[in-house]
Image (cartoon, rainbow, N blue to C red):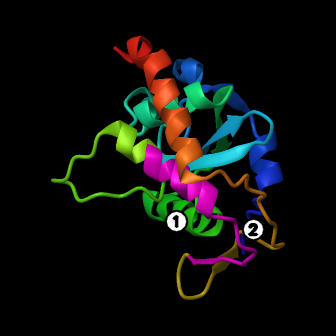
């Protein structure tokens, strides 16, 4: 049996780089975590890749995280080197998403439905304000005989509660000041 005891404390202690330096990420398989720095670290996104650097050079959530980076002081990308099949990486990723409920992971749309990035950010901001992490224990079934317990101890992730209007004002101000930097 293999245990991956992952808590927010361990995520924030993993090796990390600022989002703007993503081209320096290692070319390794594993799990990655995007989180904001500021008064309080906030886990924003969880993913997996067979090559973390390649994944982040073309990541579909890059623009969303860049906009969030304008609101907070910085977005960091942390990684956990994890050699496993894509199926096991996906199971680990899904268990972590279920456990921590990062707001950007929870934004999902049908493939044929386009929503402007600003709207996605507003929805993520609402999620940040409305969600608090729950203490739970997640088990990942790799096969019928082996269960990987990835969360041996429950933890809580404190959340700052801002109203929808406060987030909307922040988003509008960020878009006004940062609009030219994303062109």
Residue 111 covered by magenta stretch: no
Q: Is residue 12 left or right of residue 86?
A: right
Q: Nearer the viewer, mark 1 or mark 2?
A: 1
The residue sitting at 52% across, 65% down in the picture is 94
Q: Quadrant of the C terminus?
A: top left
Please state which of residues 127 and 143 is positioned toward the viewer in this rendering.
Answer: 127
In 3D space, how far apart are the residues under numbered discs 1 and 2 (Cα atoms)? 16 Å
Q: Residue at x 44, y 64 (%)?
A: 87
Secondary structure beneath dot 2 equals: loop
Residue 156 locus on image (x, y percent): 80, 65
Helix, strand or loop status at disc 1: helix
Relative placement, left or right, of 12 versus 118 is: right
Q: Is residue 95 visible?
A: yes
User: Residue 129 appears at what percent x and percent y?
Assistant: 62, 56
Q: Is residue 183 above or below residue 13?
A: above
| Residue underneath mark 1 | 94
**Dot 1: within a 10 Å radius of its alpha carbon, few (fewer than 14), some, or many (20 or more) residues?**
some
Number of marks: 2
Rendered image quadrant of residue 64: top left
Over which residues does the magenta segment extend? 122-141
- Name the one closer to the observer, 162 or 2: 162
Q: Which residue is mark 2?
A: 3
Q: Residues within 10 Å of mark 2 (few under 14, many from 20)?
A: few
Magenta-drawn stretch contains 126 = yes
| Quadrant position of residue 74 | top right
């Amino acid at each position: 049996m293999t245990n991956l005891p992952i808590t927010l404390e361990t995520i924030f202690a993993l090796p990390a780089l600022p989002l703007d330096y993503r081209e320096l990420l290692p070319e390794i398989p594993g799990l990655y975590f995007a989180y904001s720095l500021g008064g309080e670290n906030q886990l924003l996104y969880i993913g997996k890749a067979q090559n973390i650097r390649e994944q982040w050079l073309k990541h579909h959530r890059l623009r969303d995280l860049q906009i969030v980076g304008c609101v907070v002081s910085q977005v960091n990308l942390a990684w956990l080197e994890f050699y496993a099949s894509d199926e096991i990486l996906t199971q680990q990723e899904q268990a972590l998403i279920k456990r921590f409920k990062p707001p950007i992971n929870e934004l999902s749309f049908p493939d044929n439905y386009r929503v402007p990035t600003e709207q996605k950010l507003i929805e993520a901001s609402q999620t940040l304000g409305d969600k608090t992490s729950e203490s739970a224990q997640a088990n990942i079934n790799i096969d019928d005989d082996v269960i990987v317990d990835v969360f041996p101890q429950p933890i809580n992730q404190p959340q700052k509660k801002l109203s929808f209007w406060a987030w909307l004002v922040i988003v509008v101000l960020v878009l006004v000041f940062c609009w030219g930097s994303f062109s």
